[in-house]
Image (cartoon, rainbow, N blue to C red):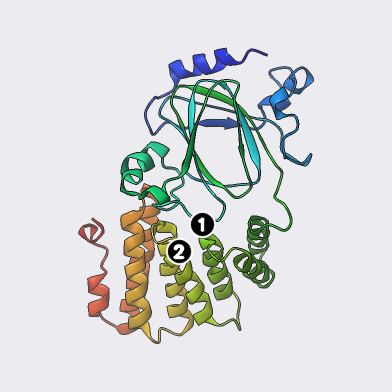
Amino acid sequence: MNLSWIAATSANVMNQSCNSQTVFDGTFFRGHKDRENLDYWFTEPEQFYGLPLSNNRRPLILSMGGAGTGLTFHKHASACSLLVHGKKRWYLYHEKVASPPGGLHPGTCTSEWIEQIAPTLRHDELPLTCEQGPNELVYVPEGWLHATQNIKPTLSVSLIENGTSKTSALALYFEADGLMNEGKPKEAIRKYKACVRMRPRFAEAWNSLGVAMLFVDGEDDTKGLKAIYKSLKLNPLHPGNYKVLGRSLKILWERNGHTGQTKYYRRGMKALKIAHQMSKEVREKKEIRRIMKAWRDNLIKGNGGDPPEAKKYSDGRSHYT
C-alpha cells in the first residue's frame, strides 16, 4: 500500500508553523461509510511482527504532520511507530523521570521546549534522542515520557497497547483516575497510594492523591495538602499543579467555615497567580481569573468589607502580567 502521497498532499495544505497540529486518526484503517474498509486489504507492516506488545492492543493509528510540528512530552502504554514518509526526531526520558524539565504542557509544541528549555539543561538532564527515517520503527516502553518533532512532513502508522500491565504504577494511576471519575474517591486513594509507593517520584499521582483525600470526609486534610505540595516539589514547573493547589486551599477555606482564612487565602491566591503566569492557554487563564475573583468576592462578603488580602489579590489585569 503506497501511502506516501497522503503525506506529500497533506503537506501542501498544512500550516507549517509550530501551532499547526499533528493529526491522528484511530479509525482510518477500520473503514468509513464513504470508503471501503481498509482493514480488508491493508496488511499490518511486517516491521510490527515480533514486537514486545501483547495481543490486547488498539487498532492501527494513522498520523501525519507538517514540518516543525510535533507532540510535546506525554506517556502511555507500550507503543511502536513506523514512519512511512518523511523524517522525525524523538526525545525520550526513562520511566523513572516523573516529568520532563520545564514540566508537562499539553497543547504546546515540542519546538518551544527545544528553544526555551533544552539550552538551559545540564548534560545529565537532556533526553535520549534519535532521528527516524522512512521504513524505520521506534518502540516506546510503557511509562516513558516522549516527544516528537517532524523535521519533514511525515506520515506514520502506530500501534499502542490497550491498557498497561496490571502491576505497573502507570496502570494503577489510570485505574485510580477511573475510580475518581466514577465517584469512588476512597477506592481511588488506595490505588494512588499503591502507585506512589511503587514510584515515589510520580508527581501526577501525588497530586491526584491529594485531591482525592480532600474529597473524602474523615480523611486528614493536612495529609491531602502535603501530597499536593509533594507533587509541586517533584514538578515545580507544571501550571496545573499550582492551579490544583489553589483550588484545594479554597476548598479548605470553605470547609473550615472561613476560619484561618488569611493563611488559606494568601497561599491559595499565590498558587493561582503562579498558575496564571505559567499557563499558555487563554481559556485556562480566564478560568483562573474567574476562580480568584469569586474567592475574593466571597471573602469580602464574609468580612463585610475589602480586607488587605483581597485588595492585594484583586482581579486587575496588571496583577497577572
Up/down of 219 relative to 240, above or below: below
Left or right? Give the position of 15 relative to 167: left
Give residue 262's quadrant in the image. Answer: bottom left
For image coordinates 56% across by 63% down, the residue present is: 205
> In the rendered image, which quarter contains the N terminus?
top right
For image coordinates 36% across by 44% down, the residue present is: 118
Location of residue 28 in the rendering, given as x and y in whole percent from the top left corner: 66, 26
Give residue 18's quadrant in the image. Answer: top left
Up/down of 160 relative to 255, above or below: above
For image coordinates 58% across by 70% down, the residue present is: 212
> In the rendered image, which quarter contains the C terminus?
bottom left
Location of residue 178 in the rendering, given as x and y in whole percent from the top left corner: 66, 58
Up/down of 312 relative to 169, above or below: below
Residue 306 visible? The answer is no
Q: Amino acid at mark 1?
A: Ala
Up/down of 37 relative to 116, above or below: above
Whether residues under marks 2 and 1 lie with C-beta atoms below 8 angstroms apart, the answer is: yes
Location of residue 97 in the rendering, given as x and y in whole percent from the top left corner: 51, 55
Residue that label 1 marks: 98
Q: Nearer the viewer, residue 94 or 103?
A: 94
Q: Amino acid at mark 2?
A: Leu
Q: CA distance from mark 2 to mark 1?
A: 8 Å
Left or right? Give the position of 144 relative to 171: left
Helix or strand or loop: what does disc 2 sit on? helix
For image coordinates 54% across by 50% down, the residue present is: 94
Disc number for residue 234: 2
Task: Compare marks 2 and 1 and give the one earlier in the sequence.
Answer: 1
Q: Residue furthest bottom?
A: 259
